[in-house]
Image (cartoon, rainbow, N blue to C red):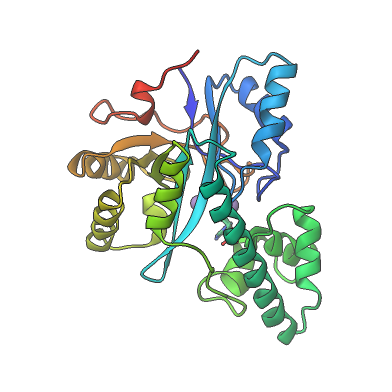
Amino acid sequence: MIVDLHSHTTASDGILTPTDLVKRAVSNQIDILAITDHDTVKGLFEAQQTINEENLPLKLINGVEISTIWKNNEIHVVGLNIDIEHTQLLTLLLSQEQGRINRAIAISNKLAKLHIENAYEQAQQFAKGDIVSRSHFARFLVAKGYVKDIKQAFKKYLGKSGYAYVPSQCCSIVDAINAIHAAGGQAVLAHPSRYDLTLTKLKLLITEFKAAGGDAIEVSQSRQTQDDLQKLAKLANEFELLASQGSDFHDLVNYLDLGKTTPLPGSVTPIWHNWLFN
Ligand code: AMP
Ligand code: MN
Ligand code: MN
Ligand code: MN
C-alpha cells in the first residue's frame, strides 16, 4: 500500500492543480493521499470532486499544514482527517490568511526599498488569487532575473538571513493542535529535521508538541538521509508518538515525487494503523 500524507496544490504553493495532483497520485499508484496546503483547505473540494467524477482509485485524506511560531522558529503542524467545514478550524485559517497578507505587504515594502517594485502584486499573480507565500515571491524574483533560482531567492531575499525577511505572523503550536483536534483530526509535527534545531532543542519541541496533545511526527519525508530517518523513528518511539510519512510534493525540482518516500521502519506505529475506510 502506498501512502503519502503531505502534499501541496495550487491552492497554496504547489505547482499542480488539485485535479492534476490526484491524477498524478493515481499514476504513481498511491492508495492514500493527503492534500495539506499551507493554511488553507480550499484545494480539497476540487480534488474530491475529480476523484468522484472520474471514479479514481484513491482515498483522499482531508489535510492542512498550519504555520506556527515556536521560540522564534517557524514550525509546521499538519492536520489529517479534519472536518474542513469546522468553524474553529476555519476561523484559525482565516486569521492565518490575514497574517500572510500583512507579511506579504511587509516583504513587498522591504523589496521596494531595494528598488524591486510591486512585488506583492506580482506575487499575487503567481498565486493566482490563492494563498500568497514566499514561494510566490521567489518565483517572481526568478522570473524577473533578480536571482538565478528559487534557492537563491530564499538565500538572498526571503529566508531568515535575507534582505527582505519578515517573520511570519501566525498562531502557536497549541492553537494549531487545538483547532485540528476540534475538527476531529490528528496533529502531526511536519518535517522535524528541517528546522535547523540542535537535538536538545528538537527534543524540547517534541516534548511541548506532545504535551499540547500532538499525535505524530513525520518520520519519512523529502530530502532526508537514512540516518535522519532512523533518528526520527527513534524519537517517535521515545516520545510515544505515531509516525507519519509524506513527500511534501510541491514540484519535481525541490521535492520528492508523490508517493516516493522511504517506507517507515517496522519499529514505529504508522499514523494510519487504525484508520477505517469505507
Ligand atoms: P511561507 O509559507 O510564506 O513562509 O513560505 C514558505 C514556503 O517556501 C515553504 O513551504 C516552501 O515551500 C518554500 N521554501 C522555503 N524555503 C525554501 C528554500 N530554501 N528553497 C525552496 N523553497 C523554499
Ligand atoms: Mn510550501
Ligand atoms: Mn512545511
Ligand atoms: Mn509542506
Estimate the x, y position of residue 81 in percent, counting from the top left.
48, 33
Residue 145 visible in the shown view: no
Seen at 58% across and 61% down, the residue is 95
Give the vertical position of 116 relative to 40 (above or below): below
Instruction: Please tell me in which quadrant of the rendered image residue 57 appears.
Output: top right
Estimate the x, y position of residue 19 in percent, counting from the top left.
73, 30
Of 219 and 39, nearer the camera is 39
Residue 78 visible in the shown view: yes
Estimate the x, y position of residue 191 in percent, counting from the top left.
42, 48
Q: Is residue 111 left or right of residue 275?
A: right
Of 240 and 172, nearer the camera is 172
Seen at 78% across and 54% down, the residue is 129
Seen at 25% across and 52% down, the residue is 211
Give the vertical position of 94 relative to 239 (above or below): below
Residue furthest to the left: 238
Q: Is residue 253 left or right of residue 6?
A: right
Question: Where is the N terminus found, in terms of image quarters?
Answer: top left
Q: Is residue 210 left or right of residue 179?
A: left
Estimate the x, y position of residue 205 in percent, counting from the top left.
29, 58
